[in-house]
Image (cartoon, coloured by chain):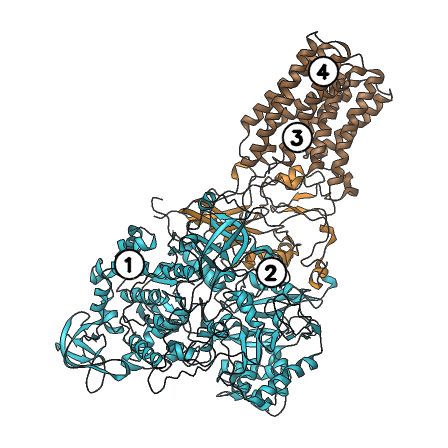
Amino acid sequence: MTRWVMVVDLRRCVGCQTCTAACKHANATPPGVQWRRVLDMEFGEYPDVQRAFVPVGCQHCDEPPCLDVCPTTATKKRTDGIVTIDYDLCIGCSYCAVACPYQARYKTLRPTFAYGKATASEAIRQDDNQLAVATKCTFCVERIDAGLEAGLQPGVDPEATPACANSCIANAITFGDIDDSQSNVSALLRENRHFRMHESLGTGPGFYYLWDREGGP
Amino acid sequence: MSYGPNPRQQASWDWRAAANFIGGGSGSGLVVFAAFADVRGGAGQLLLAAGLTLIALGLLCVWLEIGRPWRALNVFSNWRRSWMSREAIVGVLLFAAGAMVAADVMASWWVVALLAFVFAYCQARILRAAKGIPAWREPWLTPYLLVTAVTEGAGLFWLCASQYRAATLPLLAALGVFVVVRLMAWLAYRRHLRGAAPVALAALDGVGRLLQLWGTAIPLALVVIAMSGVVVGPVMFTIAAVAGLCAVVAGAWTKWTLITQAGFNQGFALAHLPVRGVRPAGY
Amino acid sequence: MTMATHTMRRVPTYCYQCVAGPDLLTVKVVDGVATEVEPNFCAADVHPGGGKVCVKAYGLVQKTYNPNRVLSPMKRTNPAKGRNEEPGFVAITWDEALDLIGTRLNEVRANGLTDASGYPRVAASFGGGGTPQSYMGTLPAFLAAWGPVDMGFGSGQGVKCYHSEHLYGEFWHRAFIVAPDTPLCNYLISLGANVEASGGVAGIRRHAEARVRGMKRVQVEPHLSVTGACSAQWVPIKPKTDAAFLFALMHVLLHEVPRVRLDVPFLTRHTASPYLVGPHGYYLRDRATRKPLVWDARTTAAQVHDAADIEEALCGSHEVDAIEIGPDGDVLGDGLLRGQTGFDRLVVHMEAYSPEWAAAICDVPAATIRAIANEFIDHACVGETIDIDGTQMPFRPVAITLGKTVNNGWGGYECCWARTMLAALVGGLEVPGGTIGTTVRLTKPMSQRLASVTPGPDGFMSYPLNPTSRELWSAQAKIRNAYNTMVPLAGNGPWSQALGPSHFSWMFLDATPPGLPRVTLPDVWFVYRTNPAISFWDTQAVGEKMARFPFVVAFAYTRDETNHFADVLLPDATDLESLQLIHIGGTKYVEQFWEHEGYALRQPVVKTRGEARDFTDIATALAQRTGLLPQYNAAINKGAGGVPLKGRYGDFSLDVTHAHARDAIWDAVCRAASADLTEGAQAHGLDWWKEHGLATKRFPRADWYLLPTLVARGLRFELPYQERLQRIGTELGRRLHEHEMHWWDAQLDEYQALPKWKNFPALWEATVIATGGRADDYPFWLLTSRSMQYAWGGNVGIQLMREVADNIAGHRGVIMNSQAAGRLGIEDGDLIELATPQRTVRGRAVLRHGIRPDTLLCLGQFDHWVTPLAKDFGVPSLNTLATMSIALTDATGSGADIVRVKIERVAP
């Protein structure tokens, strides 16, 4: 089996938002919609303060709350773990948005552009099917599928890898198959301590955060 | 719009969604209570119609909120998993049964009442399944929503009870009992609620105080006065109606607050902070 | 959209929007429209950032299609200029625009290239760090053909850069920029250096790897920047006290750590530590050769520093027969003179600067300072070596970096000296793992670091100091900021103008201080990729002065606060529309350490929008209209396009007599570059480069480090004792006083052989009083910090940048400490007013715990009032409040981004 996951190394991330911008390019999301974004979090009180940059987005959960609540079956989970939305079925009820503990879902009611009217670049990429329905990170599923079809390996070959992972200048974001013990993500998870966001909710996110190396002094 | 890591009020559902929970809860509660009160005939049909109308208005509000209203029929598709699909299906059955009762095609009020109760239950489970919102996903919200539905139904019943004969003192006593039980359910919900944002908790506590006074103490006092025999006739009915109104408005207010002010998501939290370079001293 | 019905291609190009570049990318083009920016994975093996580009490059698509662009030449119709005067720009043709400019320029040529004050009549301001050169095509050839141009009207460069580091860094170790050898470094003390925001793709990549590898970085800074966030430890130091902190580290190493733990051989052989310093503070010299003397332990006698087979004594005081020569060749002593080694002088000098002393100044516990000093030495691996490219080199995996406001303005000299000395004490200067330089800009050959290591006086490297001798010093400044007159260290090369006190050009327009020729308005001012009305200090005053400029030509992307005062707007083709070949690789700027070097092409990814025109075509047209075409073409042939067209491996020169089309010019440059790269084996033309985007060859990693070259040339680092600086400072003072110029006296104090701590924060407190306030009424330090999403990019008008930058705290207002805000009744999001005695600015409070309670922070440079989109941000800027003054200018001509302010909540 294959289970695609994202592994984010919190030690590496500097909050530059390159992944955010790359995602917006790859997916032509309208202003304000960030399928991938990086949080700026602060902990503690002066002078004992720490700050962390945390990439978030759809966690492609094992037990996606969005899947349970979607009344239309627009939200589906593939056997490889990727949670998808069928824009033709979605009625835009936003139930999935309130069900998602990761604030991953967006709904844009009307065409929205950076400067009011569509620029040439926006016009060529405008997709009315994505209006007034739920949208979210797809793990760049089209790239994965096309890449696999072309014999490429997602997470290794850029053509078959999600744009955020491709773009990350700190090598903080890695994509791969957790069911393959030899994969890049499996190695990272073996060698490093990690957690998942809001693990107690039982959603089983496909998004792992590395925070320290395993073992050693 | 960029949001930070802290919990924020969800912006996906607004007053229209709140209206669905208010109309759906009180409407279905009214149908249940009317059945329980054994109101039949013209008054019964009036109450039934009023209850179904409230439910319908709530659903209309939701329809106005969804992004693709002309695809609304897709809502029925996921009855296996989604409480929203189930709400829709039960709603259809409820309206069908109600229409049959109203048209005297079917005699059993209890079927309608049962469907209304299930409808209210579906609504309660809709919120519970919203895992992103701590104040909604708390299981103890379900009994509260069911109890307040029936309580609001009782309140609506007594709001216009002077118009029908079935309004008996035991039913008035029932209103008194329901407001008390509802408060207990609320307190239990509040006691069990974990993980909600401070602002959300403040909003809930604010509406909780309102529920205690205007939704419980005052209607209970009014019920006691009305039942005491000190007042009779129109005055008694007026007092009972005020008690009912208080019970309805307070219940509606809690749902309004839940959706529009206490609907804070969980925000983000890290189980561990990253170790940059070297582990801190005392690690 | 289905790709089957569309044509799609990926076009390689480069991004050099900020000084941390260049980086390489590809642009996806669908049906002739740019849609996506992606990394150039074909360059992954040669680019130190894996062929990736940072967030700013993703703004280039919107930059291209921004509807707010100026898309045709325009001329001003309202002759009145001012912030509140609507310019009344109307569209004109290119011919009209070029005629207007050409007429002006020809008038200038007719009147003489310099004015009555001796200043160039034509001035030009370009954005910082030289990055506009990677976008201005052959404009440098036009400027070279033109003659004298005043490039000293500051827009940020010269005073707000790493100024002291540029000058002293290049002076001491050919380090115009100083960096840690991050891939090998294990312990890094970073004082305000914001590498995670300013290090670019390569810097972020290298530091991320280092963190995961286990490098400990200690961030010493008043606020918890993104770099502080990603560090192992944050030390919230009081602003502008970094020199005291560094002095205390030196104290620990010199007075608390056993001497054997220092790199004594390094100090002895590779620095001037053993040079004997005479009673008047100048080196004792051999009477015949005038070479500095050292004490030879082998012969127990004084020897010249470069005598063969000597064993220099690091410590000691000896009476020797010598001559002591001071400024202007004055003989201060001759005969039997007592000399103390420079190192001993250093040890005595640092004795008072204990951690306990520094703690009171820096507001950092002495124990913390001492612990950091000890960790530094613990990690230094003194005595160890490492194999680099087959050569054994010293391995010293400790480094210190300095950031803005630490390495510029008052205190910059002290910090730069202490940092360099700390590296030297452990032998960690210019060796693997240690503190190293990246590039040179003042010494020649420019950009060729190792080749620039040529012998200078006294066994040190040469340095092109501006003269201070009675014979050669001149009060006649070459340009308005008087760099050659006032700042010996600025040198006199192409970059020197921008490294002068570039605020003087603005300040002296109102009142030129005694001794300098009266500062005049330039007849013509060109502006490109810069917005000094926003990016400089006291922006309101700068704007008022711009309004007096008689003729301003602005290459305009959109309307902005500077071109608001322009007479002509010229729309140049932007990043994805124009053509240029640049050099890449080697070692460059902040953290661009490549193991390859070569060239990369920026090419038209899409058709140029509107009437925008490629810069090369504009430059050619200007050359034609001014009758300078032969000189212009000759300049291109000489290398103004980045590569000399005639070299060892071929002659691709252009015929100088007639104008060449853009593609013809760059085709020749491409062929020359290709030949240079392959030693003549190939001469690929433009088409090849368009397809491939880049070509490189190996750059040896051993060339990252200066020490081997220094040793090979028999030279030493000019440390610790600054005899030469002391001498030129005294000489400069004499020259100035001879010309009744006493307004630079405070700056002359900086020329100290061993720098002392001075109360630097008090200078800014004094400014409050000087401008009419009471110091106690202005209790906050206002600082700024780099926004990676915006820095250098000129991209505030790009919606995508605004959107993603907002994810990082501080982009919507003024960061202040939560507890301090609580005491003032200020809540997150409240509108607050920041004020100096002279200016005020408003913005929203952003409450955070990661900042000192006495400090406020304005990220980036905002407060726009014309630039579309940005003018609606409502985000304040330090620049609005910062003043320009001689009192706040250090001896290198630099100031710092720091202001004393008061704040209050504005009633809603």
Expressed as whole percent of the image width and height from the top left, the position of residue C771 reads: 44, 62
Residue under circle 4?
Answer: B239
Query: Which of the chains bears the disc numbered 4?
Result: B
Expressed as whole percent of the image width and height from the top left, the position of residue C729 reads: 32, 76
For the residues bearing labels 2 and 1, Cβ distance under 8 angstroms = no
Q: Amino acid at mark 4?
A: Ile
Expressed as whole percent of the image width and height from the top left, the position of residue C152 reads: 49, 76
The chain that appears brown in the image is B
**Which color is chain A depicted in?**
orange
For the residues bearing labels 1 and 4, Cβ distance under 8 angstroms = no
Query: Which of the chains bears the disc numbered 2?
Result: A
Task: Point out the residue furthest to the top here.
Answer: B229
Tell us which disc is closer to us: 4 or 3.
Answer: 4
Residue under circle 1?
Answer: C248
CA–CA distance in space, label 4 to label 3? 25 Å
Q: Dot 1 lies on which element?
A: helix
Number of the label disc, if any, that sits on residue C852: none
Number of the label disc, if any, that sits on residue B255: 3
- Up the image or down, B247 lies above or below C861; here it is above
> Which residue occupies 50% across, 49% down?
C904
- The answer to whether residue C466 of the structure is visible from this angle is yes
Tell us which disc is closer to us: 2 or 1.
Answer: 1
